[in-house]
Image (tube, rainbow, N blue to C red):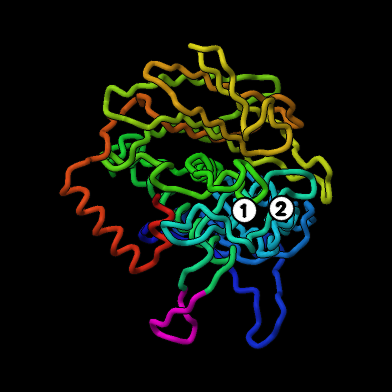
Amino acid sequence: MAKNAKIAFTDIGFVGVDALSIPPTTDLLNTGRSTSRSYEENAHIHSASWGSTDNRYTGQARAFDTFMSRNQNSDFLVVVAAGNSGTGNTLNTVGNPATAKNVLTVGSHLNSISTMNTVSTFSSRGPTADGRLKPDVLAPGQILNSARSGTNCGLMGLQGTSMATPAVSGSAALVREYFEKGYFPAGVEGEGKPIQPSGALVKAVLMNGAQFVSAAPYGNSQGFGRISLTKSIYISGQTDVALDVDDERFIEDGESRVYTKKVNTTNGCMNTEFRATLVWVDPAGSAFCRNCLVNDVDLQVTNTQTGKTYFPNGRSSRDTVNNAERVIVENVKEGDTFEITVTGTNLSDERQKYAIAFTGCFEIDGAVFVPPETSSAKGSNMMGVISVASTVAVAIVALLL
């Protein structure tokens, strides 16, 4: 739990009335935010468990992107439910405002250890009308309990992407806390310099660590997969993945920037994947656009040992549609060296700000990797944690794995 974290939401319903009243976008997204408040007092995450069935990039989706692309809102992340219209694997059912480019759109998967790699049948499917990949990620949204209104401690069983969305919002708060409390890069609280992460970085970290489920990778039902905190951040002695990031970095039109990561398993790291995820807050497109990406930034990864180049999002060439791009290289070996290139390929503006996250087995300045403990005592403690988490809410366990 991210203590004292602030997540904004708005009640848009009426008691006893089957109708919704949605405030103007600026009023809606400014809930919990004010220029008269300090950074610590403001909410940096907005959780929206509502939406429509309109699969297009509507005026409202455009308004969400406009709000998020303002400089004063660079800290902000909006998490939106994909919708519950996917029964029968019906495509193009992700609905506005989940069709916005800069939000984190959430689908649902089943909520038990044995079934968490199964997408809920009702979870709305992508792509958007203009062909972008949605939903972005999945979270537990079926077979779980929630607080029952009108009672002190009552629970009730519910399902839907509206249930999955708060789980992702809570996970985003934990990622923010990771940076703000100085866990980065050493994986120990207070050892690093406190960082105020951008919303794009929080989104990149969550999408980078997301795990594919049984559906097709980067498919219309799962996007980048179910979120997994243990695959997203480095906690010393507990997670088997080093994390490095670069946040709020500008790239100019035609410019390329290269990062280099070398696989090092001599410290006990046993992760067999290298991952890199690029996210940028793209300027708002025109309402009902057919090609909604405004600034095209590209990610590619090259293994300098083999000369092989990897393109993002399961593609065999660059992605010209999405403003979140991920490369996964499997079965990496000791000594493999990767060059990660970010290019401002076709920008409508002079420059574009981005965030990028890397995970795998590699060295990081200011950090010494400590592999997960494997002692029976540690295992016993972890089983106790999992047992308690299962009793309170199985969703917690599903988000950790």
Q: Residue at x 57, y 56 (%)?
A: 119
**In the image shown, does 286 or 140 lie closer to the viewer?**
140
Q: Position of residue 296 (x, y in %)?
A: 71, 31
Q: State the image quarter where residue 25 is shown.
A: bottom right
Residue at position x 30%, y 58% from top? 386
Confirm whether the magenta stretch covers residue 263: no
Question: Which residue lies under the disc numbered 1?
Answer: 105
State the image quarter where residue 389 is shown.
bottom left
Mark found first going from the N terminus, 2 or 1: 2
Q: Is residue 29 visible?
A: no
Image quadrant assignment for residue 325? top right
Residue 155 in the image: state x and y as whole percent.
44, 79
Disc 1 residue crowd, few under 14, some 14–19, many 20+, Cα 10 Å: many
User: Which amino acid, mark 2?
Assistant: Thr
Which residue is depicted at the point 54% across and 58% down? 109
> How many numbered discs sit on the rendered protein?
2
Looking at numbered disc 1 in the image, what kind of residue is underneath it? Thr
Is disc 2 placed on a helix, strand or loop? loop
Q: In the rendering, at what x and y percent does residue 193 appear?
A: 34, 37
Q: Which residues are magenta?
A: 146-157
Query: 178 above or below 385?
Result: above
Q: Position of residue 230 (x, y in %)?
A: 38, 45
SS state under label 1: strand
The answer to whether the residues at label 2 and label 1 have Cβ atoms under 8 Å apart is yes
The residue labelled by disc 2 is: 99
Q: What residue is at 63 percent from the left and 33 percent from the top?
A: 314
Q: Residues within 10 Å of mark 2 (few under 14, many from 20)?
A: many
